[in-house]
């Protein structure tokens, strides 16, 4: 049987990496006890997309159904033997099991298949390692990878049973190498956690600073590959990396956007969500997810061209729920049904009925074709202007910056001198009122019940 060549090591996490010409074979386990809500084709296609995201060429795949998980191999012994025969001919660089594996199952599968094996967690870590650009993103990915690797030392190292002596700080004579390896990883994890605390303090200061910026924040969320970055580029003209692959964007990207009512907002692109994301990987989303929690408007982008878009929508709602965003009652949320240019006439008509009579805020568009963006911008403007009221301020006459801010972010209806103060009446939303107060330390004399859209 041909020995499989290992993938090149990756500097960030030390797991299977990728390279030009490397190939993959995908094993997709499907439970017969609890069948998935999606079709097998959709689930397998997601696995193909994850492999392509790190430039692996898929040379074969197999859907394996199981009644219960095999503790030793995850899949059945007979199935493993059949796959091993197929791998002799295909000789893939790596076998991807699109499911979480225990360290023992991963090691046993490698022995049974005579091939390098990574599970879904390892594959997503590999993608994260390539996509992360900010310091915090890279640290989070490295931390998650080390924690993942620590549980797999029994599989990952070839010198585990060797004996070695050493200086005092590396352990005394006779200590097994596996214990030294685990200690080194644990020490590095501690250093990374300390470094992350410093980075997070800096990020928290940056977020508080952004709260003083006089612009509402509009955040894009959605399942990975739903078209968020394409929509971001369409609306802002930015050159954000946008490809037809999972996790094309990992780190947060922000741009200023002018709405039809002349108001300016900050548009934030975020990492795509995905089903069955391991808990310890959620930390790598932290920087972008916080943009969602503190956003004034949340745009949920849905790839309506997929047959499983409803299930993807539910997965996103579940993750937002973990962030304490109550989806059904949160008034900040606008649903965007993207890629409508790929729908057939009947599906398009059904979607129109849903958007018109669904009772929620929804808009249909094609980010790629630039269809429907005007309706979206109008809806965002209406959302940011919601609950606009007239506020009255007494400004210092010489405070031209504060007056200019009110003109730029509200609708000034009256301005006149009142004693030694400049009395200004302005229509604006509660968000802008708070940001004006934070930046210039002016409090309104009182808000009337009079509203203006």
Image (cartoon, helix red, strand yellow):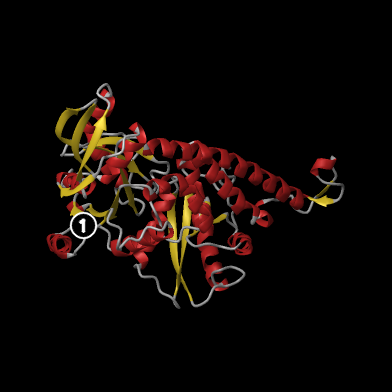
Q: Is residue 278 left or right of residue 453?
A: right
Q: Is residue 168 above or below residue 322?
A: above
- Asked whether 359 or 93 is in front, the reply is 359
Q: Is residue 441 above or below residue 24?
A: above
Task: Specify the quadrant of the image occupied by residue 420.
Answer: top left
On the image, the x and y values in percent for residue 126 come to: 50, 47
SS type, badge 1: loop
On the image, the x and y values in percent for residue 87 come to: 52, 59
The residue depicted at 52 percent of the width and 68 percent of the height is 82
- Asked whether 87 or 163 is in front, the reply is 163
* Residue 6 visible: no
Q: Is residue 343 left or right of residue 299?
A: left
Task: Specify the quadrant of the image occupied by residue 13.
Answer: top right
Spot the residue most to the right.
Answer: 173
Q: Is residue 195 above or below residue 35?
A: above
Q: Which residue is mark 1?
A: 361
The residue depicted at 80 percent of the width and 43 percent of the height is 170
Total marks placed: 1
How many other residues sit within 10 Å of disc 1, few (<14), some (14-19) or many (≥20)?
some
* Residue 270 visible: yes
């Amino acid at each position: 049987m041909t020995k499989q060549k290992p993938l090149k090591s990756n500097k960030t996490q030390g797991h299977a990496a990728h390279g030009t010409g490397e190939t993959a074979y995908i094993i997709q386990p499907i439970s017969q006890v609890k069948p998935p809500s999606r079709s097998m084709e959709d689930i397998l296609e997601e696995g193909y997309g994850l492999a392509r995201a790190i430039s692996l060429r898929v040379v074969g795949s197999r859907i394996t159904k199981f009644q219960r998980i095999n503790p030793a191999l995850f899949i059945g012994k007979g199935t493993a033997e059949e796959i091993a025969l197929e791998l002799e001919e295909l000789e893939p660089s790596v076998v991807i099991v699109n499911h979480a594996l225990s360290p023992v199952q991963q090691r046993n599968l490698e022995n049974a298949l005579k091939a390098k094996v990574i599970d879904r967690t390892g594959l997503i870590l590999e993608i994260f390692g390539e996509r992360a650009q900010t310091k915090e993103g890279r640290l989070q990915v490295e931390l998650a990878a080390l924690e993942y690797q620590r549980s797999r030392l029994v599989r990952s190292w070839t010198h585990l049973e060797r004996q070695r002596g050493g200086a005092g700080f590396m352990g005394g004579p006779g200590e097994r190498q596996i214990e030294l390896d685990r200690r080194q990883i644990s020490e590095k994890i501690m250093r990374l956690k300390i470094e992350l605390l410093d980075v997070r303090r800096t990020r928290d200061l940056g977020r508080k600073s952004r709260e003083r910026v006089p612009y509402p924040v509009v955040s894009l969320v959605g399942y990975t590959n739903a078209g968020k970055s394409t929509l971001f580029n369409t609306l802002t003209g930015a050159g954000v990396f946008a490809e037809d692959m999972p996790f094309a964007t990992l780190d947060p990207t922000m741009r200023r956007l002018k709405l039809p009512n002349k108001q300016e907002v900050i548009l934030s692109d975020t990492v795509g969500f995905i089903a069955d994301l391991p808990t310890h990987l959620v930390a790598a989303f932290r920087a972008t997810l916080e943009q969602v929690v503190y956003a004034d408007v949340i745009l949920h982008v849905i790839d309506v061209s997929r047959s499983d878009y409803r299930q993807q929508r539910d997965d996103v709602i579940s993750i937002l729920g973990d962030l304490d965003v109550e989806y059904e009652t949160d008034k900040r949320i606008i649903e965007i049904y993207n890629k409508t240019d790929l729908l057939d006439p009947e599906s398009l008509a059904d979607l129109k009925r849903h958007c018109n009579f669904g009772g929620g805020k929804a808009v249909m568009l094609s980010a790629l074709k630039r269809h429907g963006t005007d309706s979206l911008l109008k809806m965002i403007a209406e959302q940011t202007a919601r609950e606009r009221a007239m506020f009255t301020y007494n400004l210092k006459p010489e405070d031209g910056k504060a007056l200019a801010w009110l003109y730029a972010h509200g609708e000034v209806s009256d301005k006149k001198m009142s004693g030694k103060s400049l009395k200004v009446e302005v229509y604006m939303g509660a968000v802008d009122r708070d940001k004006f107060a934070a930046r210039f330390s002016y409090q309104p004399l009182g808000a009337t019940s009079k509203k203006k859209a």
